[in-house]
Image (spheres, rainbow, N blue to C red):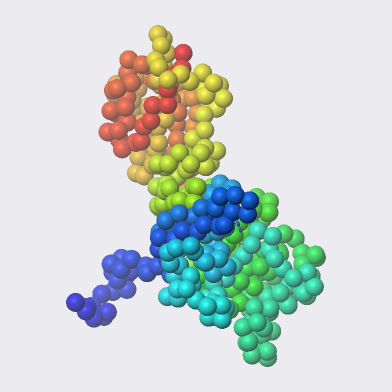
């Protein structure tokens, strides 16, 4: 049934219609011929949809297949099987000439910036416009606009060697945006930067996403990057997507071991050595159960342990913990020691309050 658009307010429409994916990978596999032996299956059966206007982070260890994934999206590699579609064009099936045209809707930024050292900041930004055959007379104004957007108007005549890492990446971002792409691909764009510069680049990318509605697909090996910018995350391991979801959900309820290991230092999930070294799988006389409590959502800041003591007279030892905010929502982790005899009651009580619990083991 065709419903006239005027029937709904804009916000109702936005809620009813999920954002259409601007990047789609359908059953994509990539096998590289092995140079000295067996072929390497870099990606296997990847299905991934990146909704228009979203920021999707793909995280994986070295060799997981992240770069291959991004090279498939910009058509630098062809899949062995499956389809890659960007902004309606089947990138994986286009001949080189059509691909060059399609790439104008895909911007890319790199870990090592990939600027031309013989060109100034402004000339680097102008390059894709020259290649795309832009009206030469219109290029300087467009370059000025882009340099202003990334906060580098005063550096337009500097060469890359005269710029800091963060400034070089800003030039890289301005260059990537020159042809008004629909999608920005970021390949470890902050991995070579210090934490403060990383934050400023991620802030800039967030602003570009919000103000220009640009879809961002970024690959990284750092959860800190995902949590500061992405709304959704896909975890890739051994060429497969092993977990995918909303950043808050994946951070607070990771399901896959690889995701947990990425999060270990990020959300207070790792145990301090004085607990980890004493942890045993079985209870022993006089031991305490070690329980991880995950606080999220409406009960994240409730004084639950105080209530446990008051209502059930069960006292717990706090062994480790942290309170945090992920994707603007409060969450926390506490690791507590619970008397073995009170374990069942404690778990039932915490579950009643909507908290996640996990018995990690026992310490004497
Ligand atoms: N051109 C190639 N020829 C053969 N094998 C390749 C090629 N490119 C990548 N590979 C292999 O494919 C697998 C995935 O590599 P890829 O570079 O996509 O991983 P990655 O997650 O980006 O790793 P890193 O973070 O170290 O860059 C690896 O086993 C790698 O050795």
Rendered view: 97 above or below 23: below
Image coords of residue 11 (percent x, y): 32, 69
Percent position (x, y) of residue 41? 51, 53
Q: Does residue 184 appear left or right of residue 172 in this picture?
A: left
Q: In this view, does 320 lie above or below 323?
A: above
**Is residue 53 visible in this depiction of the protein?**
no
Foreground pick, 296 / 233: 233
Residue, x 56% and y 81% (percent of image)? 97
State the image coordinates of residue 159 (x, y, percent, origin top left). Answer: 79, 70
Mark yes or no: residue 161 visible. yes
For this orientation, the residue located farthest to the top is: 285
151 left or right of 271 in image: right
Residue in the foreground of this view, choosing between 238 and 314: 238
Which residue is found at the position 56% from the left and 77% from the top? 96
Q: How many numbered marks, from 0 up? A: 0
| Residue furthest left as drawn | 1
Q: Which residue lies furthest to the front in this view?
A: 37
Residue at the image position 76 percent from the left and 64 percent from the top: 163
**142 or 84: nearer the eye?**
84
Q: In this view, does 226 lie above or below 263?
A: below
Residue 276 appears at what percent x and percent y? 52, 24
Q: Residue at x 39, y 47 (%)?
A: 249
Q: Is residue 145 above or below residue 253?
A: below
Where, quadrant-wise, is the N terminus in this rendering? bottom left
- Location of residue 298 by image quarter: top left
């Amino acid at each position: 049934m065709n419903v006239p658009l005027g029937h709904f307010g804009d916000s109702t429409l936005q809620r009813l219609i999920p954002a259409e994916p601007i990047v789609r990978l359908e059953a994509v596999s990539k096998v590289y011929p092995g140079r000295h032996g067996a072929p390497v299956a870099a990606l296997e059966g990847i299905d991934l949809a990146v909704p228009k206007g979203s920021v999707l982070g793909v995280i994986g260890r070295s060799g997981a297949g992240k770069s291959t994934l991004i090279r498939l999206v910009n058509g630098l590699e062809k899949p062995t099987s499956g389809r890659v579609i960007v902004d309606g064009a089947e990138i994986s099936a286009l001949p080189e000439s059509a691909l060059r045209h399609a790439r104008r809707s895909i911007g890319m930024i790199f870990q090592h910036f990939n600027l031309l050292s013989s060109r100034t900041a402004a000339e680097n930004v102008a390059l894709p416009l020259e290649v795309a055959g832009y009206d030469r007379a219109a290029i300087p104004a467009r370059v000025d606009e882009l340099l202003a957007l990334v906060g580098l108007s005063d550096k337009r005549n500097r060469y890359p060697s005269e710029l800091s890492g963060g400034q070089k990446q800003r030039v890289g971002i301005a260059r990537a945006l020159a042809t008004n792409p629909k999608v920005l691909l970021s390949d470890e764009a902050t991995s070579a930067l210090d934490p403060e510069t990383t934050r400023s680049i991620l802030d800039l990318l967030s602003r570009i996403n919000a103000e220009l509605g640009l879809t961002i697909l970024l690959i990284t090996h750092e959860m800190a990057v995902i949590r500061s910018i992405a709304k959704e995350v896909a975890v890739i391991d051994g060429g497969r997507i092993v977990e995918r979801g909303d950043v808050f959900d994946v951070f607070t309820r990771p399901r896959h071991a690889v995701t947990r290991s990425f999060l270990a230092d990020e959300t207070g999930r790792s145990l301090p050595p004085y607990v980890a070294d004493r942890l045993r799988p079985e209870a022993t006389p006089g031991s305490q159960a070690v329980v991880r409590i995950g606080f999220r959502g409406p009960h994240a800041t409730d004084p639950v342990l105080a209530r446990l003591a008051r209502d059930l007279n069960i006292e717990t030892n706090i062994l480790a913990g942290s309170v945090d905010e992920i994707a603007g929502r409060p969450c926390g982790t506490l690791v507590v020691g619970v008397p073995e005899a009170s374990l069942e009651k404690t778990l039932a009580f915490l579950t009643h309050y909507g908290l996640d619990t996990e018995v990690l083991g026992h310490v004497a």
